[in-house]
Amino acid sequence: MSLACVPQTQCPLQRHISLAEFTTLNVGGSAEWFVEPRTITELQAAYTWAQEEALPITVLGAGSNLLVSDRGVAGLVISTKHLRYLKRDLETGQLTVGAGYPLPRLAHCAAKLGWRGLEWMVGIPGTVGGAVVMNAGAHGGCAAERLVSVVILEPDGTLAVVSAQELGYAYRTSNLQDTPRLVLQATWQLEPGHDPAQVKAATQKHLSDRLRTQPYDFPNCGSVFRNPQERTAGWLIEQTGLKGYQIGGAQVSQKHANFILNCGGATAMEVYHLIRHVQTTVADRWSVWLHPEVKLIGDFA
């Protein structure tokens, strides 16, 4: 399989591309095969090719909320970063956005229009596709709240429009997780007609709050653990005395204990061991098992 492009497209098909530069943690090995489709047609072709070759498929958006194994990822890795189109319906107040569209940019776009509903997105370093799959949220808002529908690439290569009600949304989860169905675009129903200055101010306040309380000085993957019902994960970790705890180049943030930082030269395995150490230490102290929000990709045996 010495192909230069995905069959019947001009989309380059690359081999052994390091994924560290494609993740916000800056760790991880190489992709066996790697593509960056610029259109849905190219993405469909890449997906079909991988299936014909019996290759596993992994999708990357902004590379946040991911921990990629140092041993790399087998099969085909599809980056959606070029699927960044946005369509606005001025009559209905709906925004339809490609899977690779960055969430902060989407929040600012809605604010400039004076459309309320996505202010909470501004500080999340992810993309639309990932937000829809995991029901990303912050500041009391989440992806599922105003979501109308998504376009999904089904395992048989066909496209399907699926309503938000069909996706089984709950806290940081949906029935799209751990399935071969790929999100290509999403449509949100917003509240048009507001003063853009006021929506911008609310959006900026959310961003300022995140910059004040969360670490942005070192590479990280965002919140590592889901919040249990009793207490927040950050509070449990902090009260266990784990702020600043370090394994190799991986460190529990001093600023927010639910973040793990790459302080320089960290490996994915060091981050993995730090996650496990936090889980077991918190469980010993509080009898609460913290479930990761970050998704592990590849072999961590």
Image (spheres, rainbow, N blue to C red):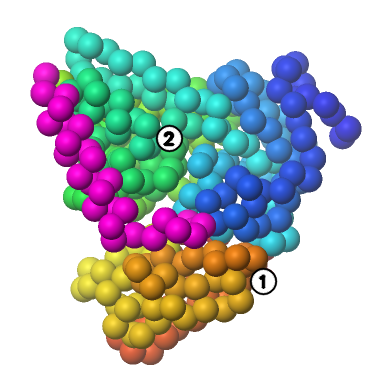
Give the residue number, with chain letter if any, for mark 2.
102
Q: Which residues are magenta?
A: 193-222
Taking the spot 71% from the left edge, 48% from the top edge, the residue there is: 18
Q: For the residue marked with disc 2, what is the amino acid?
A: Pro
Taking the spot 34% from the left edge, 67% from the top edge, the residue there is: 256
Q: For the residue marked with disc 1, what is the amino acid?
A: Ala
Count of all numbered marks drawn on residues in the image? 2
Disc 2 element:
loop
Disc 1 element:
loop
Check the picture and name the quadrant holding the N terminus.
Answer: top right
Q: Which mark is residue 116?
A: none
Q: Which corner quadrant of the image does residue 28 belong to?
A: bottom right
Q: Residues within 10 Å of mark 1 (few under 14, many from 20)?
A: few
Determine if the magenta segment contains residue 117: no
Give the residue number, with chain letter if any, for mark 1.
301
Where residue 155 sits in the image (x, y, percent)? 57, 33
